[in-house]
Amino acid sequence: MLACSSWLYFIVKQRNLINLREKFFKQNGGLILQQLLTGQENLTETAKIFTAEELKKATNNYDETLIIGRGGFGTVYKGFLPDNRILAIKKSKIVDENQIERFINEVVVLSQINHKNVVKLLGCCLENPVPLLVYEFVPNGMLFEYIHNENKVSFETRLRIATESAEALSYLHFAASTPIIHRDVKPSNILLDSSYTAKVSDFGASRLIPLDQTELATMVQGTIGYLDPEYLQTSQLTDKSDVYSFGVILVELLTGRKALSFDKLEMERSLVTYFLLSLKENRLFEVVEKHITNEGNAEQFKEVANIAEKCLKLKGEDRPTMKEVATELEGLRRMEKHSWVNADFNSEETEHLLAGTSNSSKYDVRNNSTDIYDSVKDHVILDLDGGR
């Protein structure tokens, strides 16, 4: 009798769990997503709808030892599928049911992106109270950690990472089927794969925008230190907002300094302000990170600084496009490679530089979407309605 009661209890519990998952699946737009994916059967790359059970097994029931990232909006877990594929599973804390259809559309559009420098969105799971996003796993962490944790990253590697990131943003702005404005470009949203190739990630704050249009936002989103001042003032979102943020990253790569440093003197706390003042006073080489001044040449540092300065113009219309930035950086990379091959070093200099390279080589290794699928630590959302 006891065994029979236990069996009945188990059956009822399982049935309730299945019903609950079906409820969440419908509530989170599962039927809409299935319909959209059915219309894209001719495409080789479509988003996969994972079951809750698949991701539970992949993460060993969301084992805390598999957490690879935390933020104000959620947690990212490392997961393993039976076919040995490794995933990054983003579990958000909150959901706005009014934004579900936009979220589903964004999943479909982002899953179609196929660029070597953009983290691939593989799919989602809708059988939980809050939808889970599933991405390819990128093993070598964030660019932020790579450049700020005492790694002596070579100028050549910095320039390559900058170029790859610029090419990714250019693709999102100009080559994606629906232009995408990232809206939270920063070093912690650029990941590095097993070969230390840059991959732009975290589209939680992104916007899918029709060509040649701007969006008037009621909520300004981004990260302090990287926010476009024009977007902050006018609430008008354009691709030039990403350009400004990328300019800050370029300065970080040149100087090794963080965008904001409250432990420094007041004039040095804002990296952008300090950098632009240094350029104005012709003191660029005082702010370039010391160990990279021994590499490359002065002209290359000046060129990167000039590109950054153009990206940081106060007016968006005065900034270059990401396509122009990517082209200029790629030109500098070619120049850098050419100067390395043809440089006329004496044997002592050559030996010294090769030793330095050896040491550093180990490190070389638009319909609107929802505002809430983001898990970054320093993310800020500013509600502008209240101030009007």
Image (cartoon, rainbow, N blue to C red):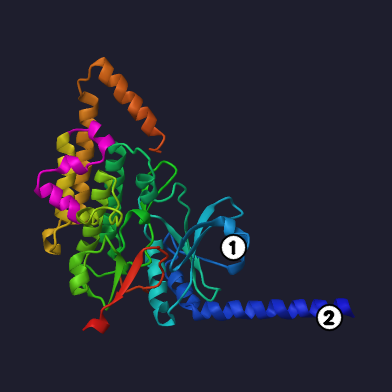
Tell which of 100 and 230 is nearer to you. 230
Q: Amino acid at mark 2?
A: Ser
Query: Could you tell whether 197 is left or right of 209 in the image?
Result: right
Q: Position of residue 4 (x, y in %)?
A: 86, 79
Q: Residue at x 13, y 43 (%)?
A: 283
Quadrant assignment, res 322: bottom left
Find numbered disc 2 in the image and state the secondary structure of the residue it sits on. helix
Query: Is any part of residue 116 visible from this angle?
Result: no
Horizontal and vertical percent position of residue 138: 45, 50
Disc 2 versus disc 1: distance between alpha carbons? 30 Å
Identified at 37% across, 66% down, the residue is 109
- Vertical side of 338 occupied by 164: above or below: below
In the rendering, at what x and y percent does residue 183 appear?
A: 29, 64
- Marks 2 and 1, the one that precedes in the sequence: 2
The N terminus lies in quadrant: bottom right
Q: Secondary structure at mark 1?
A: loop
- The magenta stretch spans which residues? 273-297
| Label drawn at residue 5 | 2
Whether residue 16 is visible: yes
Query: Hey, which residue is sitting farthest right in the picture?
Result: 1
Closest to the camera, between mark 2 and mark 1, is 1
Viewer-proximal residue among 48 and 60: 60
Majority secondary structure of magenta residues? helix
The location of residue 217, given as percent across then percent down, is 25, 76
Residue visible at 62% across and 63% down in the picture:
61
The image's mark for residue 10 is: none
State the mark number for residue 62. Answer: 1
* Residue found at x 19% / y 50%: 325
Q: Quadrant of residue 161?
A: top left
Is 286 within the magenta? Answer: yes
